[in-house]
Image (spheres, rainbow, N blue to C red):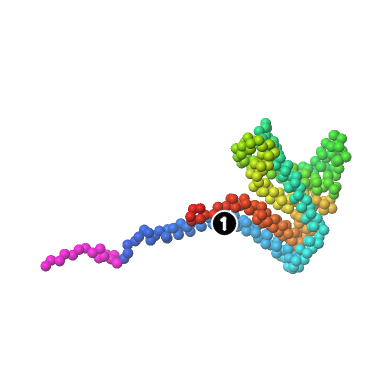
């Protein structure tokens, strides 16, 4: 009787050991690629994170720490006084005046500077000869540094022989001239004039960018329906320009709170603190009087005011814009 043996696939060398499967290596390869992706992303972000930590976050934390000490800026703070610097801060007539002047600058910026910038943007958005030149001329002051701007207007508004007084004298209005930066009754108005000249071109360019994004079909449809120029601007252009306006208002308010360069170069806070801002007061105490602990308290309050305003503005004003710019990914594709 002859028996026939069929080859058994389980016999032979390597019998009993599972054959390698490509699917078994797939999770390992995917995990390796994911790890490489995160390491690459972290490598690109690490320099920026180190700079932010060393130049922004750590100085902020140290300023908060130093605000609780009586410290002259040399060595490490050691004379702990608790919240005495903050108590002194809100009893200081100069700092309370800084808060009032900050509010005045914010109100003037929103009521004068931004509407003027918007009007110029609407004008330069029309078809007119040489509008590119006008745009460049109006934007050019923003390119200049604050120091150059301050020195320039210091010469323009110099008493008696300044350019402004000479022009007013030639047109018979010499009585309006005087000590622009030295008179307590005119110094804030003069500072705001310089501030407007410096920054209105930036806001004007923001508005121009927003105006050019308004669909022309909507304004033409309103024109066909018989809407006047004011009605087209109020009912069509202005609502579509609202996101740009909100960003412009935010930048103007934060800039007014932190204003330093122009005031320091033109008046250094004088005369008799009548043009001083929070940033100028902080500089005076920190680098002129060597009361760095008190100056740190001023910086903490400035940061707190800016932070509260930014969070409240984002929560109540920018909420619609942020919701419109954010999408949520769902598994159902909706």
Residue drawn at the location 61% of the way across and 41% of the way down: 213
Q: Position of residue 285 (x, y in %)?
A: 78, 58
Residue drawn at the location 81% of the way across and 38% of the way down: 163
Q: Position of residue 84 (x, y in %)?
A: 77, 66
| Location of residue 165 (image quadrant) | top right
Residue sitting at the far right: 175
Residue sitting at the far top: 129
Residue drawn at the location 76% of the way across and 55% of the way down: 278
Q: Is residue 216 visible?
A: no
Q: Is residue 271 visible?
A: yes
Residue drawn at the location 79% of the way across and 57% of the way down: 95
Q: Position of residue 122 (x, y in %)?
A: 68, 39
Q: Nearer the viewer, residue 178 or 221?
A: 221
Q: Nearer the viewer, residue 162 or 9?
A: 9
Residue sitting at the far front: 225
| Location of residue 131 (image quadrant) | top right
Residue interval drawn in magenta: 1-16
Is residue 10 located in the magenta-colored stretch of the structure?
Answer: yes
Q: Nearer the viewer, residue 65 or 93?
A: 93
Looking at the image, how many numbered discs can be counted on the residues? 1
Q: Position of residue 154 (x, y in %)?
A: 80, 44
Report the residue marked by disc 1.
46
Determine whether the residue tagged by mark 1 lies in a helix, strand or loop. helix
Dot 1 crowding, Cα within 10 Å, few <14, some 14–19, many 20+: few
Instruction: State whether the magenta stretch is mostly helix, strand or loop.
Output: loop
Q: Nearer the viewer, residue 87 or 51?
A: 87
Q: Quadrant of the N terminus?
A: bottom left
Is residue 3 located in the magenta-colored stretch of the structure?
Answer: yes
């Amino acid at each position: 009787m002859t028996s026939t043996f069929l080859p058994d696939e389980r016999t032979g060398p390597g019998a009993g050991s599972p054959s390698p499967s490509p699917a078994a290596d797939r999770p390992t390869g995917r995990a390796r690629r994911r790890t490489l992706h995160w390491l690459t992303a972290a490598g690109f972000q690490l320099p920026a994170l180190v700079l932010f930590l060393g130049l922004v976050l750590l100085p902020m934390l140290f300023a908060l720490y130093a605000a609780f000490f009586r410290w002259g800026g040399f060595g490490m703070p050691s004379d702990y006084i608790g919240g005495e610097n903050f108590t002194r801060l809100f009893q200081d007539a100069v700092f309370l005046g800084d808060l009032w002047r900050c509010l005045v600058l914010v109100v003037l910026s929103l009521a004068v500077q931004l509407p003027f910038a918007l009007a110029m943007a609407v004008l330069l958005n029309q078809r007119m000869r040489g509008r590119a030149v006008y745009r460049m001329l109006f934007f050019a002051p923003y390119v200049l540094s604050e120091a150059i701007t301050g020195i320039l207007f210091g010469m323009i508004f110099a008493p008696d022989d300044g350019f402004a007084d000479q022009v007013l004298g030639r047109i018979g209005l010499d009585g309006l001239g005087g000590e622009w930066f030295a008179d307590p009754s005119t110094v804030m108005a003069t500072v705001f004039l310089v501030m407007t000249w410096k920054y209105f071109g930036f806001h004007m360019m923001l508005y121009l960018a927003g105006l050019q994004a308004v669909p022309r079909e909507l304004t033409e449809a309103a024109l066909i329906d018989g809407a006047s120029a004011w009605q087209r601007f109020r009912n069509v252009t202005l609502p579509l320009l609202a996101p740009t306006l909100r960003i412009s208002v935010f930048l103007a308010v934060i800039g007014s709170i932190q204003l330093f360069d122009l005031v320091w170069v033109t008046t250094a806070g004088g005369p008799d603190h009548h043009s001083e801002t929070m940033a100028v007061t902080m500089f005076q105490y920190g680098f002129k009087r060597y009361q760095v602990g008190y100056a740190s308290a001023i910086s903490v309050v400035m940061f707190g005011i800016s932070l509260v305003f930014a969070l409240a503005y984002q929560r109540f004003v920018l909420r619609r814009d942020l919701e419109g710019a954010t999408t949520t990914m769902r598994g159902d594709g909706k």
